[in-house]
């Protein structure tokens, strides 16, 4: 019986064509896990969300392409801009709060985003920001003061129900306690 070569890099690939809610992950022994999602390439070869009208890198129109989707590494979906001017690249899930590192999602790979300040009204684990495919969602983690979404050009902010994820679009302001953050992206409306 032939034995595997232990010096050769190990690669595992799970392919789920036409199913973006369950992203594909490639893991190798030498490299960190890389998330794969369905997307399209512009005429210059840049990988994009199939729903965007222009390439996120070079800006050319995607209207002339046939939009045949392929699996590829998801680029950052934008940034989170905190009310104090701090920015965080949106390429992973985040847990936001005074003590976000205590949330089990951080042990599973989410990044802790610690928000402090005197009388901030922010809970220890206030909210979670998750990425699924090309979609950004926010869920209130049962915080004491709640989470309010203020979508762009919408005069009616909406309070999140604890534990119920809500999709956010670029330009959405997320108010939590006395603090806020805004999701900014090249896909801003």
Image (tube, rainbow, N blue to C red):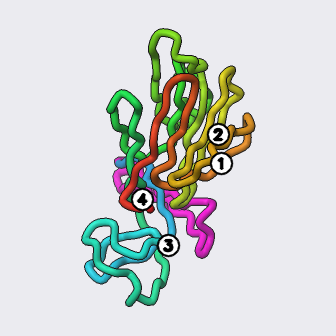
Total numbered badges shown on the rendered structure: 4
**Which is nearer the N-term, disc 4 or disc 3?**
3
- Whether the residues at callouts 1 and 2 have beta carbons within 8 Å, the answer is yes
State the image quarter where residue 62 is shown: bottom left
The crowd level at tag 4 (other Cα within 10 Å; few <14, some 14-19, many 20+) is few
The crowd level at tag 1 (other Cα within 10 Å; few <14, some 14-19, many 20+) is some
- Whether the residues at callouts 1 and 3 have beta carbons within 8 Å, the answer is no
Residue 1 left/right relative to 59:
right
- Reply yes or no: does residue 28 show up in magenta: yes
Where, quadrant-wise, is the C terminus in this rendering? bottom left
Q: Residue at x 47, y 61 (%)?
A: 36
Q: Residue at x 47, y 9 (%)?
A: 118
- Residue, disc 2: 139
State the image quarter where residue 163 is shown: top right
- What type of secondary structure mainly makes up the magenta span? loop
Residue 106 left/right relative to 49:
right
Q: Give the Cα distance between marks 4 and 3.
A: 13 Å
Q: Give the Cα distance between marks 1 and 3.
A: 19 Å
In what element is the residue under mark 4?
loop
| Residue 3 seen in the figure | no
- Residue, disc 4: 188
Q: Give the Cα distance between marks 4 and 1.
A: 18 Å
| Residue 151 seen in the figure | yes
The mark lying in front, picked from 4 and 3, is 4
User: Eyeballing the image, is 45 above or below 177?
Assistant: below
Q: Give the Cα distance between marks 3 and 2.
A: 24 Å
- Residue, disc 1: 166
């Amino acid at each position: 019986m032939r034995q595997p070569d232990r010096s050769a890099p190990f690669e595992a690939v799970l392919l789920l064509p036409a199913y973006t809610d369950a992203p594909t992950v490639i893991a190798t022994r030498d490299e960190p896990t890389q998330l794969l999602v369905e997307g399209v390439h512009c005429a210059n070869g840049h990988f994009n969300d199939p729903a965007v009208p222009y390439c996120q890198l070079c800006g050319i129109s995607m209207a002339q392409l046939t939009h045949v989707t392929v699996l590829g590494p998801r680029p950052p979906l934008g940034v989170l801009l905190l009310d104090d001017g701090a920015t965080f690249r949106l390429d992973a899930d985040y847990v936001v709060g005074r003590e976000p590192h205590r949330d089990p999602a951080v042990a599973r790979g989410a990044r802790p985003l610690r928000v402090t300040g005197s009388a901030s009204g922010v809970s220890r684990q206030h909210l979670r920001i998750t990425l699924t495919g090309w979609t950004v969602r926010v869920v209130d983690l049962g915080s004491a003061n709640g989470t309010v979404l203020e979508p762009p050009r919408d005069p009616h902010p909406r309070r999140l129900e604890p534990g119920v994820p809500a999709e956010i679009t670029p330009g959405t302001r997320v108010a939590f306690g006395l603090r806020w953050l805004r999701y900014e992206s090249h896909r801003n409306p």
